[in-house]
Amino acid sequence: MEASESNSVNDTHINAHNNEHHNTPLNLAIVGCGQIVTHHVEAISKSLGSKLRIRALCDPSEERRRILESFAGDLGLLFGTNTDVGVVQCASLAELMERDVWDSIDMVFIAVPHDLHESLALLALSQSSTNTNTSPKMVILEKPLAPTAASCAKLVQASKALCTAGTNTGTML
């Protein structure tokens, strides 16, 4: 997919969300708070600005979560910067999914080594399809999508199944 096509797909999802929710920002959960994700957060800030807020950070390292929260705060991307709500921090995606905040997450950005993409993306996508109490989630992965063609096929199939079911979810990059 060309970069311009990718941006138009994301813009379509973001605009659909904004139309449904009266221009409220998308709530983003970031899974994986290593150093590379700061580049992605900076790009998010430049391209989406007020259309998106970081609502949750998931990483086993509390120190990496704090560093990313501080970096994102300097860019004005944090949820609750003017309230006492703040950003939820968890050690894992599974832990986040057990918290009440999961229902408010619109988009999950998985920024972990690619050999972990499949299990985490399938977890987020399956929760979107089976839990009627939660809104469908957009899932974003950086390349490579997964380490094998079979893993990629599973992710594409899961994403298409949600899109076919009429949800505005399953977007993967």
Image: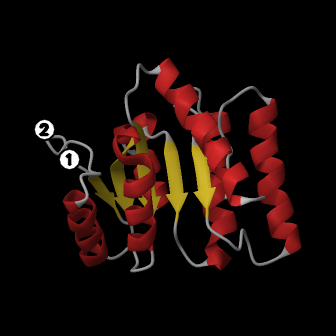
Front residue of 114 and 13: 13
Asked if residue 99 lies left or right of residue 151, the reply is left
Residue at the image point whose x is 24% and y is 73% from the top: 67
Residue density around tag 2, few if under 14, some if 14–19, many if 20 or more, within 10 Å: few
Image position of 80 with respect to 73: above or below: above
Residue density around tag 1, few if under 14, some if 14–19, many if 20 or more, within 10 Å: some
Q: How is the image coloured?
A: secondary structure
Asked if residue 29 lies left or right of residue 112, the reply is left
**Secondary structure of the residue carrying numbered label 2:** loop
Which image quarter holds the C terminus? bottom right
Asked whether residue 155 is in view, the answer is yes
**Secondary structure of the residue carrying numbered label 1:** loop
In the rendered image, which quarter is residue 85 located in? top left
Decide: marks 1, 2 in contact (CB < 8 A)?
yes
Mark 1 and mark 2: Cα distance apart in space = 7 Å
User: Residue 12 at what x, y percent from top left?
Assistant: 63, 35
Front residue of 166 and 76: 76
Q: Say which amino acid is labelled 2.
A: Thr
In the rendered image, which quarter is residue 9 located in? top right
Q: How many marks?
A: 2
Q: Which residue is mark 1?
A: 86
* Numbered mark located on residue 103 in the image: none
Residue at the image point whose x is 67% and y is 71% from the top: 143
Image position of 101 with respect to 23: above or below: below
Which image quarter holds the N terminus? bottom right
User: Residue 89 at what x, y percent from top left?
Assistant: 29, 58
Q: Which residue is mark 2?
A: 83
User: Residue 24 at what x, y percent from top left?
Assistant: 37, 28
Asked whether residue 32 is in view, the answer is no
